[in-house]
Structures are given as structure tokens and as C-alpha cells.
Amino acid sequence: MFRNAAYLGWPKGRYTHKFGLQPAVTTAFRTVWPEAGLYPAWDSAASVVSVSSASGSDTGDITIIGLAATTFLPLRETITMTGATPSLTTASFARVFRAAYNKTAGVATNVGLITGTISGDNCLLIRAGVGQTEQAIFTVNAAVKRAYLLCTQYQCGKGDECNFVAYVREPGGAFHSIDSVLALTDGESARAFAPLDNPIVGVELLPKTDVDIRVQTVTGTGRSTSRFTVWEPR
């Protein structure tokens, strides 16, 4: 059961829930999102986002959420898709960490794989029939004094064992690990909670810090998932 922060007695502030899916783990680390390899758009030049679908039927609206170029302040824009023909945002994005497709009349959700790019690099993926991105990444906006990484959860498929590592990168720095968990199989699924489940003791994140949850296999090559919460206190 999900309960909001006020119900749990947590401090006031903005809580952002993030989650991701990696369809096929390997011995090499992959970001927990629906593509092989590490998330490719961290160092892409800020630009408009180009969005297209593998299906010409996807002509609904898509809302893209991230951070604005130059300022790194929160930015949200909704544009109308034109199927396989690229559609462009008006604003330039420095980061994209979530997108949601709004169905058209008579269509339940997106028919094809939706891909968004910044300066030619993939920055968002929405699997066919899912309707929203599944990417365990985040960037703290420049307006907050500090934020905290909380409530990380990791899970891999039946019979698999996976090593999950939370990586962060402060402005001007390099990605480094701040949490590592081995998810061990229990016959049904392998699940682990990192000890970041209290907003008082979460990992502090500075403004413009990037968060990238990565996974590698120990045993098995199935799918894995991760979710976490970022708290921006008032």
C-alpha cells in the first residue's frame, strides 16, 4: 500500500517518485531503463526534444518533464505527436527524466515504441502499450538548497541475482556509487530494500546532482526494476 508523506508523518516538502525497468540484465552495468547500456544523454548538449513513435497511430499528446537548459529549473511541455514523424518541443531541455503519452480517442495507450532524443541521444523511451517512461534516473533542480534520496527498492526476476548500485554525480564531478545492494532470489523474485527508508537519514543531494540507478547480473539475464523517492524539503 502506498501512503503519502503526511500520513506517514514525514517532513513537509516535495516528494518525487521515480521507477525504472531494465528488460535484460548483463554482466556489464546497465541503467535501469528500457535500453541496453548506460543512460546516454547525461552529457548531451541541451536542446529541444525530438519525439517520434515506431507506429504512425501515435498521434496523441506527450508531456515531457525535466529541467530547462541553462537554468536547470523544472520544465514541463506538452506537444502533439505525429506518429513516426518527429515532433519537437518549443523549449530546450538540459535533462529529461519523465514523459507520459496521453491517448487519442479510441486508443488505450501508445501503439509503438516512443523515442525521444536530445542532440541525437536517446533521453526517453516509452515501451509500446505502457504510456509512460520507466527510467530510474533523476536530476535535482537548481532552485532547491538540498534534496534527499529515499526509499530505494530493487528487484530482479525469478531465479536471478543482481547487483544494484545507486550512482550520483555532483556538478562538475564524475559518477560515483553511494549505495550497493545484492538482490538474492527467494524462488519467486529477488527483492531488496536499501537502508534509505527514513527521510531523516537519506542521502543528501546538492542542486543539479544527477542520480542513475544501475544493475548488473550475478546469475540470470532476466528483467530488473528499481524505484526510489527524492525529497526536497521546504
Image: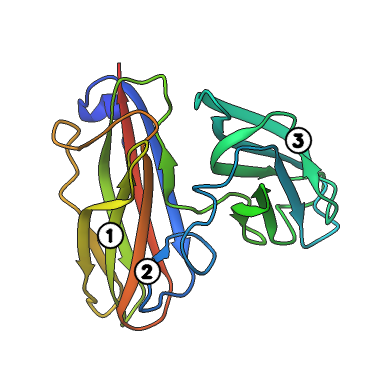
Q: Give the residue number, with chain letter if any, for mark 1.
A: 165
Quickly name the residue at label 2: 29
Q: Of marks 1 and 2, which one's residue comes earlier in the chain?
A: 2
Q: Amino acid at mark 2?
A: Phe
Residue 160, quarter of the rendered image: bottom left
Q: Which residue is mark 3?
A: 79
Asked whether the beta carbons under mark 1 and mark 2 sit within 8 Å of each other, the answer is yes
Alpha carbon separation for disc pair 1 and 2? 9 Å
Task: Name the one closer to the observer, 33 or 206.
Answer: 206
Tags 3 and 2 touching, CB below 8 Å: no
**Figure disc tally:** 3
Q: Is residue 84 left or right of residue 18?
A: right
In the picture, the quarter occupied by the C terminus is top left
Q: Position of residue 208 (x, y in %)?
A: 40, 32
For marks 1 and 3, the one nearer the N-term is: 3
How far across and down, in percent of the image, does residue 111 sit? Answer: 75, 60
Please tell me which residue is depicted at 49% across the width and 59% down the height of the picture: 33
Contact (Cβ within 8 Å) of mark 1 with mark 3? no
Q: Residue at x 41, y 19 (%)?
A: 143
